[in-house]
Image (cartoon, grey):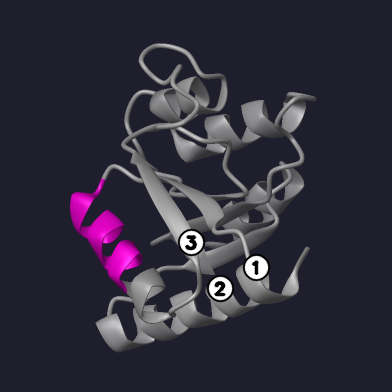
């Protein structure tokens, strides 16, 4: 089975590391790449501004997106992704600390495929990543 290319947009290095460790523990084949804000996410997806090498920056099969980031936040990045015919097919999973109903509804309204509130406890976070991996990487095609 071909590894899944995951692109995570999150400005928190600790969250990036936790996500990477949790996905590794799930033992499913995947590669994870990171960007620190929505502007970098859009540049990566369009292979511009330093992200031109498609070997080093492959097309993602799945995007994990934090909402609260500098430059271009996750809300705006989600809108731009889902408005762009070339990339709107990529599943976008919101992975954020906010559990406000307004944020959830707005995210789904702009085309998010799932919304996950980041658990604070590592074991709960690991379980959430296991479920995410099982569903989005093993089950969904």
- Residue 92 is situated, as x and y percent measured from the top left of the image, at 62, 49
- Rendered view: 105 above or below 49: below
Q: Which residues are magenta?
A: 12-21
**In this orientation, which residue lies closer to the viewer: 29 or 81?**
29
Label located before the other in sequence (2 or 3): 3
Distance of mark 1 from mark 2, alpha carbons?
Answer: 6 Å
- Rendered view: 136 above or below 110: below
Look at the image and tell me in which quarter the N terminus lies. bottom right
Position of 91 compared to 28: left or right?
Answer: right
**Callout 1–callout 2 Cβ contact below 8 Å:** yes
- Rendered view: 118 above or below 63: below
**In this orientation, which residue lies closer to the viewer: 91 or 2?**
2
- Residue 104 is situated, as x and y percent measured from the top left of the image, at 61, 58
Residue at 49% of width from left, 39% of height from top?
Answer: 74
**In terms of secondary structure, what is the magenta stretch mainly?**
helix
Residue at 73% of width from left, 24% of height from top?
Answer: 84
The residue where tag 1 is placed is 136
The residue where tag 3 is placed is 30
Residue at 37% of width from left, 86% of height from top?
Answer: 124
SS label for mark 3: strand
SS label for mark 1: helix
Q: Which mark is residue 132?
A: 2
**In this orientation, which residue lies closer to the viewer: 50 or 77?**
50
């Amino acid at each position: 089975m071909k590894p899944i290319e995951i692109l995570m947009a999150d400005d928190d290095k600790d969250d990036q590391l936790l996500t990477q460790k949790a996905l590794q523990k799930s033992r499913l084949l995947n590669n994870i790449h990171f960007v620190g804000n929505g502007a970098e996410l859009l540049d990566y997806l369009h292979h511009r501004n330093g992200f031109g090498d498609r070997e080093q920056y492959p097309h993602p099969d799945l995007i994990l997106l934090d909402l609260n980031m500098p430059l271009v936040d996750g809300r705006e990045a989600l809108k731009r992704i889902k408005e762009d015919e070339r990339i709107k097919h990529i599943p976008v999973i919101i992975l954020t600390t906010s559990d406000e109903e307004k944020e959830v509804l707005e995210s789904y309204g702009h085309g998010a495929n799932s919304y996950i509130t980041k658990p604070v406890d590592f074991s709960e976070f690991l379980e959430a990543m296991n479920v995410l991996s099982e569903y989005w990487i093993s089950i969904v095609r």
